[in-house]
Amino acid sequence: MIALIKTIFNQDIIFVLLTISFLLIAMLKSLYWKHAKLLFMGIFAQRYANQYLKEENAFTERVNLITFLLMSINISLIILKLIPKTSILETFSLIGAVMLFFIIKIGLILLLGSIFQVKDIAKLGIFFSFLFDRSLGFFLFPLLILLYFFAFNITHFVMLIVAIVFIVLLLLKLFWLWKIGTNAFGFSPLYIFLYLCMLEISPLLLLGKGVVY
């Protein structure tokens, strides 16, 4: 009986979080789709990302905020599936930890930009780094619905798809950061490699280790 109550309680939390995700996506679709579409298309062609940056205004700031929340919630829900929680406090603590992880990453990039006196480039680095993470948060939503509410247990199949989507977006991110860094700004490949290892790959390895162990 206790196990049944905990399962229902967990599902209630998941339902609320997925409802919030759905509302965030609905806001993007109904109010800010022109800008959101440019943001998501930016993962495939740099001209869309450049156009999004050129149109920077109050609307793009709202899109950035909405997609940040969407990214944080949906990625947390994936982690939650790997390390099940049984209380509201633990669940929202996880979401808070994921948000803090991204905020620390932003702070480190800004700090490096300040140290090396390339603040404008640091802001662009934040945009292109989180461009793929924001898109991942958006693409995860239908997979999360299948993961938590499908009639049959297809967890392994859905997690495989999630892993494939994540790897593809990660490779695209690394490719675009390398290409933009070397071609657009003329950075040394060594510096770009160190940046990718320190702020893109190492945090993911640490996060993966924390989830698994």
Image (cartoon, rainbow, N blue to C red):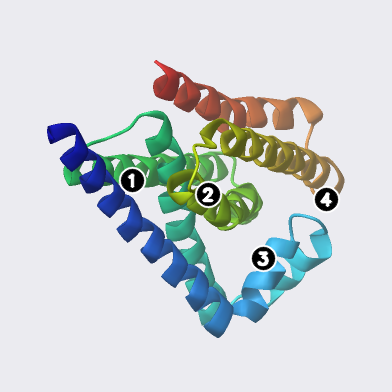
Is the residue marked by circle 3 packed among few (<14), some (14-19), or many (20+) residues within 10 Å? many
Q: CA distance from mark 3 to mark 1?
A: 23 Å
**Residue 107 seen in render:** no
Q: CA distance from mark 4 to mark 3?
A: 19 Å
Residue located at (41% from left, 41% from top): 104
Tag 4–tag 3 contact (CB < 8 Å): no
Q: CA distance from mark 1 to mark 4?
A: 35 Å
Could you tell which of marks 2 and 3 lies nearer the N-terminus? 3
Which of label 2 and label 4 is nearer to you? Answer: 2
Q: Which residue is mark 2?
A: 146
Asked which secondary structure carries label 3, the reply is helix
Q: Which mark is residue 95?
A: 1
Vertical position of residue 208 compared to residue 54: above or below? above
Is the residue marked by circle 2 packed among few (<14), some (14-19), or many (20+) residues within 10 Å? some
Residue 211, image x, y percentages: 42, 24
Tag 2–tag 4 contact (CB < 8 Å): no
Residue 70, image x, y percentages: 46, 58
Q: Quadrant of the C terminus?
A: top left
Looking at numbered disc 4 in the image, what kind of residue is underneath it?
A: Ala
Q: Which residue is mark 4?
A: 184
Q: Which residue is mark 3?
A: 39
Looking at numbered disc 1 in the image, what kind of residue is underneath it?
A: Ile
Residue located at (74% from left, 36% from top): 171
Q: Looking at the image, which is closer to me, 191 or 43?
A: 43
Tag 1–tag 2 contact (CB < 8 Å): no
Could you tell which of marks 1 and 4 lies nearer the N-terminus? 1
Q: Residue furthest top?
A: 213
Q: CA distance from mark 2 to mark 3?
A: 25 Å
Could you tell which of marks 2 and 4 lies nearer the N-terminus? 2
Please tell me in which quadrant of the rendered image residue 1 appears.
top left
Looking at numbered disc 2 in the image, what kind of residue is underneath it?
A: Leu
Residue 35, image x, y percentages: 64, 76
